[in-house]
Amino acid sequence: MNGLLQSLLELDATVFTWINTGCSNPVFDAVAPWFRERFFWAPLYLFIAAFSWLNFGKKGWIIVLGMVLSVAITDQFSSTLIKKNVQRLRPCNDPAMSDRIHLRVHCGSGYSFTSSHASNHFAVAVFLFGVLGPIRRWIKPAALVWASSIALSQVYVGVHYPGDILCGALTGAFFGWAVGKAGRWTVDGRR
């Protein structure tokens, strides 16, 4: 088992280096740091809230509440349970990675596994799939591209390994699905 884990960690570091340094370009250098800023996405969150209230009336608050609940559950699971127990160093804090990294933002002192950015945004994306996807088909690809771009920017700027974002995305997707499944009937009348 240790050999398999070591192989996975080496693969993770190799893919990290490829994304972080091999994909370097001025456009990503300018855009990726902004993608991970929570206030950068505030207009999108306001749009989703307005869209929900305008299209579903009083039931629109369920969508907003569901997104908040999805993020709250996922964030606590990722930050409190997983990160504190796994205690994986961020690549920008890992001495073994110091010569292979292009750090494009402040590193932070927290742990890396799982990525809370990835888990939180995939929770919202998958929640929106379940609640609005059957009604507005364009939401599925838009939400997936949005969450993926935020998650990949974490690797590009140097603060997470690809495995951190993959596991964070899967964690968020699960909780987003669960909350969406529980609340879907309130929006479109189906379970």
Image (cartoon, rainbow, N blue to C red):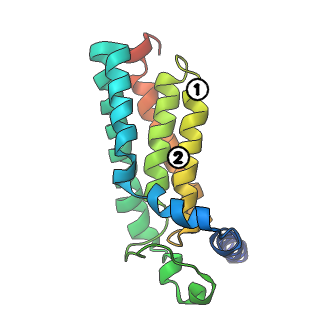
Q: Amino acid at mark 1?
A: Trp
**Mark toward the viewer: 2 or 1:** 1
Residue visible at 50% across and 71% down in the picture: 159
Viewer-proximal residue among 3 and 159: 159
Viewer-proximal residue among 119 and 138: 138
Q: Is residue 146 above or below residue 91?
A: above
**Residue at label 2?**
147
**Res. 14 image quadrant:** bottom right
Q: Amino acid at mark 2?
A: Ala
Residue 30 relative to residue 100: left or right: left
Give x and y (percent) for residue 86.
47, 70
Residue visible at 47% across and 82% down in the picture: 93
Q: Is residue 33 above or below residue 22?
A: above
Residue 22 relative to residue 119: left or right: right
Residue visible at 30% across and 14% down in the picture: 57
Viewer-proximal residue among 173 and 100: 100
Q: Is residue 55 above or below residue 95?
A: above
Residue positioned most to the top: 189
From where the camera sits, is residue 177 visible? no
Q: Secondary structure at mark 1?
A: loop
Q: Secondary structure at mark 2?
A: helix
Give x and y (percent) for residue 34.
45, 59
Image quarter in which the N terminus is found: bottom right
Residue visible at 51% across and 53% down in the picture: 150
**Residue at label 1?**
138
